[in-house]
Image (tube, rainbow, N blue to C red):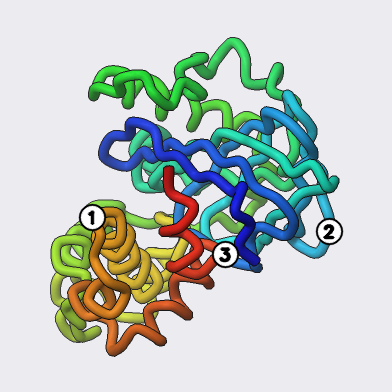
Amino acid sequence: MFNAADRIRHGKGAPGVERMEACLHGQAFAPHRHDTYAVGITLSGVQRFRFRGRTWHCLPGQCHVLHPDELHDGGAGTDEGFSYRILYVDPALVQKALQGRPLPFVANPVIDAARLKPGVPAEIWDIDGELDDLARIGIVDALAAWLDGVAAPHGASVTRFALAPLQRVRECIAAAPSVRHSMDELERIAGIDRWTLARQFRAAFGTSPSRFRTLRRLDAVRMLLASGCALSEAALEAGFADQAHMSRQFKQAYGLTPAHWAAAQR
């Protein structure tokens, strides 16, 4: 439920990197899943969330790390609410930094911020600092190495794939997310069958081609809403059948309705 004291402020980002600060109360987010890595630090209060069947508490000075496409919620552990800063990173950048190795999965999502040092630069939390390409690559490279170091072991059955064909499919979808590309077309672009494509796309980028398309549409919705566009217009412009469909997908991706999201922007 919307709280008039809730605030969401977006920092300076760069391609594949989004930074945000939020101050929230109560059960702020319904269960949702996004297709990015999310690395945040609690600034005040107690952040409580459900993740992989457990309830976790993230205290000031602690970080939370969420893998792409993992269901979670979020809320305050006390009546005072909580605040945090967070970095959302495109898993494709992590893939590039790891040179095609499987995406790292961090099983324990709450980690003391001190464990980020010395590899991850302090600029990760400076959401208002300029993020040029040099800084962006430095942060992502350090973050990817750190994630790989604290991740659960991959085990013996690691999916092997060629990244270039999958990247072509990803770029095709991202270039025009409102277009419904057929599986026949995507098979031709990748040069592999649809089942292999679906399986390897998820292994490489953390989500399915279909969900990747939906999230890119929702990126467009957020930009349109931030510019003052009406909900119904934003839905149609981004390629959704109607406002109701867009609103359902928005809440499933971000844990709150588009109207709540728009009202909390500062």
> How far separated are the C-alphas under marks 1 and 2?
38 Å
Q: Which residue is mark 3?
A: 255
Q: Secondary structure at mark 3?
A: loop
Residue occupying image coordinates x 16% and y 65%: 172
Residue 84 vertical placement versus 47 (above, below)? above
Q: Secondary structure at mark 2?
A: strand
The image quadrant of residue 50 is: bottom right
Q: Earlier in the sequence, mark 1 or mark 3?
A: 1
Q: Earlier in the sequence, mark 3 or mark 2?
A: 2
Q: Are marks 1 and 2 in contact (CB under 8 Å)?
A: no
Under mark 3, the amino acid is Gly
Nearest the viewer among 238 and 118 is 238
Residue 156 vertical placement versus 184 (above, below)? above
Q: Which residue is mark 1?
A: 227
Q: Earlier in the sequence, mark 1 or mark 2?
A: 2
The image quadrant of residue 104 is: top right
- Residue 212, given in percent of the width and then of the height, sits at 36, 66
Residue 53 vertical placement versus 98 (above, below)? below
Residue 136 vertical placement versus 49 (above, below)? above
Q: Secondary structure at mark 1?
A: loop
Q: Which mark is residue 54?
A: 2
Q: Are marks 3 and 2 in contact (CB under 8 Å)?
A: no
- Residue 94, given in percent of the width and then of the height, sits at 41, 39
**Crowding at label 2, few (<14), some or many (≥20) Cα neighbours within 10 Å?**
few
Under mark 2, the amino acid is Arg
- The answer to whether residue 137 shows anywhere in this view is yes
Q: Quadrant of the N terminus?
A: bottom right
Under mark 1, the amino acid is Ser
Give the mark toward the camera: 3 or 2: 3
